[in-house]
Amino acid sequence: MKILLTGFEPFGNEQQNPSEQLAKLLNGASDGDAEIVSAILPVERYAALDKLDELMQQQAPDMVVALGVAVGRAAITPEKVAINFDDFRIPDNAGHQPVGETIFPDGPTAYFSTLPINLMVKEMETQVPSAISFSAGTFVCNHLMYGVLHLCACNYPKTRAGFVHVPQATECLSPTSGEVPHLPLSQMAEALRRAIWRAAFHKGDDIKLNAGDTH
């Protein structure tokens, strides 16, 4: 069994991206006959998905877990849904800044994660704060999540995939970071490792979890 784990390069004014560091920390981890293979993607609207598609063709993974950072969140948050919508508040690293554009004109309005994210949250809660998120945003993270689920639906129907946002890492804080929530990389890596194995070996439907919003 092969799990493809991706992180992103730094973007905006940041010099580091915890999703990149976590992907590198978990590269090569194994459990029985299951192995994690990691890759780092550019924070670019088109190039990120193109590279991921190439990796999927090369690696033929059973499961894809894409990581991204959500500065300001205090927990590791697997995403429930990705929408067919690009609306970038800032340009990506290639200068793209779409406003209200579809990702795939012929694609559905949204895709739900095919990972057992409720089970993953329950596993991670034993190590770090974790919760389900119902918005992957409208930047490159959402673009990638929607894109990989579209690729799976069209070309890789047996591959499960989803996206997980992580908070800022303690090690990535800078003097200009301000008061933002953060977690140590080692704790996040251990929580993600456990969650990935639980998801990889889980059969059947996801567990039930009261994770909905109150508004």
Image (cartoon, rainbow, N blue to C red):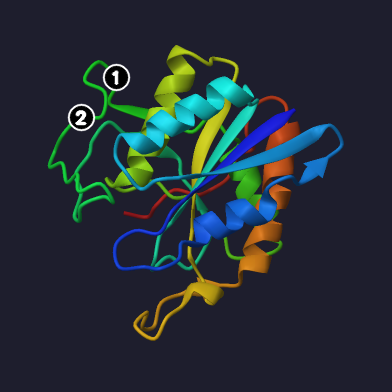
Amino acid bearing label 2: Thr
Quarter of the rendering occupied by the N terminus = top right
- Residue at the spot x=41%, y=77% of the render? 180
Q: Secondary structure at mark 1?
A: loop
Asked if 110 appears above or below 26 in the picture, the reply is above
Q: Quadrant of residue 22?
A: bottom right
Quarter of the rendering occupied by the C terminus = bottom left
Residue at the spot of label 2: 102
Q: Residues within 10 Å of mark 1 (few under 14, many from 20)?
A: some
Q: Secondary structure at mark 2?
A: loop
Q: Residues within 10 Å of mark 2 (few under 14, many from 20)?
A: some
Amino acid bearing label 1: Gly
Badge number at residue 107: 1
Q: Quadrant of residue 6?
A: top right
Left or right: residue 164 versus residue 96 is: right
Q: Is residue 180 visible?
A: yes
Left or right: residue 97 versus residue 212 is: left
x, y percentage for residue 37?
66, 39
Asked if 179 appears above or below 195 in the picture, the reply is below
Looking at the image, the residue that sits furthest to the bottom is 175
